[in-house]
Image (tube, rainbow, N blue to C red):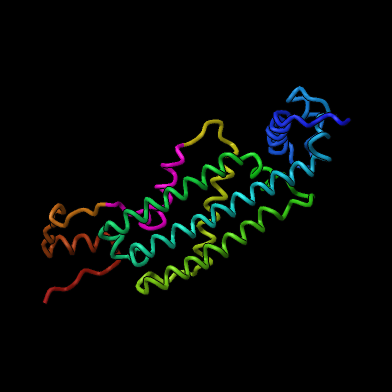
Amino acid sequence: MPRPADPKARSALIASARAEFAKRGVKGARISDITAATGLSKGAFYLHFPSKEALFAALVEDFLAALERLATERKSRMDRFCVQYGGVPGPGDVAARSERYRDFLRMEAALDVEMLELMWDQRELVTALIVGSQGTAFESVMWDVVDREVDRIAREFHHLRGQQPDTPDVDPSLFGSFVVGTYLLLARRMGRLTQKPDLASWAVGLQRLMHEGTLPRESVPETAVQARPSPPPSTRRRHARAANPHRPPRKRP
């Protein structure tokens, strides 16, 4: 009778394999190193996975399924928000920081936290997909995900922009590339971190950058700006000659 597979051993092998894949890539990772880090034998490995490629494929499949669940949840929450508020915030809402805009920002930030949490949990796998899958059957997986997510965000952006005709004219694909590219770089950065960052702060910052840009949230009141008196004509002429010494002096009438 074959020996039953131990679920704890499977979890240990997966955790070790993630670290090896991130460090050495799919081709460079060795089953002996994966098992040595867990104190298990190669026989224990083969009880759970027929090969290291099969283990990596299982990790990728779980990751893609999680991404799909988050995308479905995001669309569902966005639809509910639009029903409740009659659409997404427009430029006027952003400028006035209306209640609709603040609720929208909170919702988007909460969704971003969920995505960032997934990227943090899967940072070793994402690192392996980005820089450690070349020359394998997995080398296009991450870029297929990128293309799919750019298209999805572009479609959503195009749909939501139709509800706000006064929204600035931005190419939906460019917007999608901006969002996905930002997440891709953050995921790569996570792979180098040893301590978990403040993902909630990251999420709020991302949303404010996307909707408000980098300008200060509070503009300086005009009354706070001291008006400079105009210099007398003689001073203006001296400044002009200093700026252009080769210019002949102006003759007085």
Q: Is residue 133 magenta?
A: no
Q: Would residue 249 be found to the left or right of residue 114 on screen?
A: left
Residue 159 vs residue 222, the one in the foreground: 159
**For the image shown, how many numbered marks are present on the structure?**
0
Q: Position of residue 86 (x, y in %)?
A: 34, 67
Q: In which quarter of the image is residue 231?
A: bottom left
- Quarter holding the C terminus is bottom left
Residue drawn where x is 37% and y is 70% of the image? 167
What range of the chain is rendered magenta? 198-217
Residue reaching furthest to the front: 1
Relative vertical location of residue 44 with respect to residue 125 in this rendering, above or below: above
- Quarter holding the N terminus is top right
Q: Main secondary structure of the magenta part?
A: helix
Residue drawn where x is 68% and y is 38% of the image? 22
Q: In which quarter of the image is residue 170?
A: bottom left
Q: Would residue 140 be found to the left or right of residue 230 on screen?
A: right
Residue reaching furthest to the right: 1
Residue 194 vs residue 145, the one in the foreground: 145
Q: Position of residue 188 (x, y in %)?
A: 59, 44
Residue 206 vs residue 121, the one in the foreground: 121
Q: Position of residue 112 (x, y in %)?
A: 47, 49
Q: Position of residue 32 (x, y in %)?
A: 82, 29
